[in-house]
Image: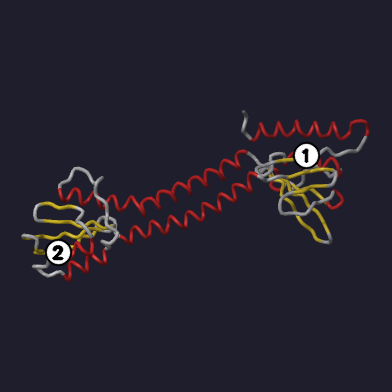
Amino acid sequence: MCETRSCARRSNAGVLREVLERTTRDGVNRMPTITSGTTTERIVRNALVMLLVDGFTVAYVWDGYVGYARQNAAELARVVGMGTASSLASNPRMTTAEGRRIAAETQPGAKLDDITSALGAPTVTKDEEVYFLGPGGWLRLQLDKGAVVSAVWTDGKRSESDQRWQRGIGFVLAIVGVVLTVQLARVVSTRATLSDAGLRVPGRPLIPFDAMTGLRVPGGGKGGRVELEYSLDGRRGVIHLDEYVFREAPAIAAAIRERKAFPGPRG
């Protein structure tokens, strides 16, 4: 399949020839309907942007809820000499604020049972040390016969603040992704229709042929755009027939020029 603009122009020329043949057949001045969707290039570009944003959304949300906490678990596993962090689950009650509070307030001789009654079982027990893993770090208790000797909180590589930022950015990107999805739907449904009644494009009223006043080709036609000037209900306006937006824009412009006997392209 040919996707280049030169091939598209050849295809448009074929459409125009067919239109003109049908328009003048049997001497009857008729306007066969030309319906144009948008180009594959435009759809693909919008889809790629949407997919890119969706991919970043998943990555940020994943890190904010799962990935960063797992990195902290892996760091604790390395500290205690474990081969894997797969069995280490963070305790949601072991927040950074709570860990720092316990480390600051726990006095030597405190009972481990008093702490586990509030936090639950330790994440890791190793000799006379126990560790409570939280999303943003871990609390290490040094023990002696079940009594606490020292309590130290260690921030993980990925703090709770880092995780909140990841989640926040992910939520913002999710909203952007929804907007881009709606935009893609609009792009896919783009239609321009030229018939005996006139030209209809999205966001504009029907422009009858009597209201069309001229065709301009800005920039010498290098951008593949034609501007249709019109005057409707006392108001002047311009419709941009861009072959990037409307696949059959050249055929539509040529049919209008033929019907209205407009002069050749002008800048």
| Amino acid type for the residue under numbered disc 1 | Ile
Q: Which mark lies nearer to you, 1 or 2?
A: 2
The amino acid marked with disc number 2 is Ala
Q: Image height check: is 190 above or below 122?
A: above
Q: Which mark is residue 87?
A: none
Q: Quadrant of residue 130?
A: bottom left
* Among numbered discs 1 and 2, the one appearing first in the sequence: 1
Which coloring applies here?
A: secondary structure
Residue hosting label 2: 151
Q: Could you say whether the residue bearing mark 1 is in a helix, strand or loop? A: strand
Label 2 CA crowd tier, 10 Å (few <14, some 14–19, many 20+): many
Residue 214 position in % (x across, y down): 81, 50
> Residue at the location (18% across, 56% down)?
131
Q: Residue 113: give x, y in percent of width and height.
A: 15, 63
Give the percent coordinates (x, y) of residue 230.
80, 54
Residue 168 is left or right of residue 25, and the answer is left
The reply, left or right, for residue 98 in relation to residue 169 is left
Q: Residue at x 77, y 56 (%)?
A: 237
Nearer to me, 255 or 87: 87
Q: Quadrant of residue 258?
A: top right
Query: Looking at this rendering, what residue extends furthest in the top direction?
Result: 1
Which residue sits at x=51%, y=51%?
A: 177
Residue 94: percent from the left, percent from the top?
26, 61
User: Which residue was labeled with disc 1?
Assistant: 34
